[in-house]
Image: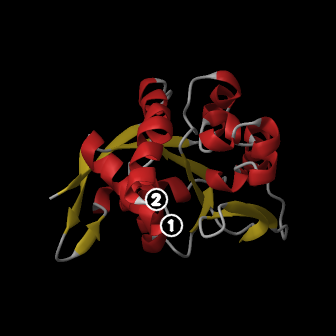
Amino acid sequence: MTNISENPVHGLILPQEYIDHAKILARRKERTILAIAGAPGSGKSTVARLLHEALKDISMIVPMDGYHLSNKELERLGRKERKGAPDTFDVWGYKALIERLKNQQKNEIIYAPEFYRTIEEPIAGSIPIFDNIPLIITEGNYLLLAQNEWKTLAPLFDERWFVTAPIAERQQRLVDRHCYFGRSVEDAKAWVEHTDEPNAQLIEQNKQNVNLTIEWKNI
């Protein structure tokens, strides 16, 4: 396990070894799908973003969060208060997208959805993926979950990275995030305790087929 550090002066630091490894993956003859998974607040989205920023010309990020069920559908199902749990996503829709990306045809543009936190809803057709991009970086909580329909995803990925972080730091990031998007501190802490943390424990304890584990720490 290698650490990723957050330097208060120089900002976020992604070790060169990860960038170099991803470059090697991108040189394969066929398109490579790199999955980056982790618990809420672990830093997986940041790892994906930093990796893409280092490899802009050869990579694209496709987040799992675009397959959140809409708030309207969550209300119908009675799951809105558990938004973010495994059964609040369209896993089969996400799986179909990954399968399409693995077999993208020449001159075909595939559109992926994106989740917008400002409105707490996914929007279809937000991310265009072109056929000449060799490395697809997909990130999300449940990509490596060894339960139910989620367990069918891992074999689709060419490489699987798992991002982890100390519990206190992970939870504080989540509280800060929820507050930034409009929750009170009390509501944010309650959501983390009753929704985010049970999901985090499920993810940490039921991951499968991990090729590389990254620990994110503040220093």
Give the image location of residue 201, x and y in percent.
42, 30
Q: Is residue 44 above or below residue 119?
A: above
Q: Identify the residue under disc 1.
A: 181
Picture coordinates of residue 190, whole percent (x, y): 43, 44
Disc number placed over residue 178 in the picture, else none: 2
Direction from residue 158 to residue 174 in the image, left or right: left
The front one of 215 and 203 is 203
What amino acid does circle 1 point to? Phe
Q: Can residue 70 be seen in this snapshot? A: no
Residue at 73% across, 39% down: 91
Please give left or right for residue 218 compared with residue 172 in the image.
left
What element does badge 1 sit on? loop
User: Residue 87: x, y in percent?
Assistant: 69, 34
Residue at 50% of width from left, 34% of height from top?
199
Q: Amino acid at mark 2?
A: His
Q: Quadrant of the C terminus?
A: bottom left
Q: Closest to the observer: 28 or 119? A: 119
Disc 2 is placed on an element classified as helix
Figure quadrant of the N terminus:
top left
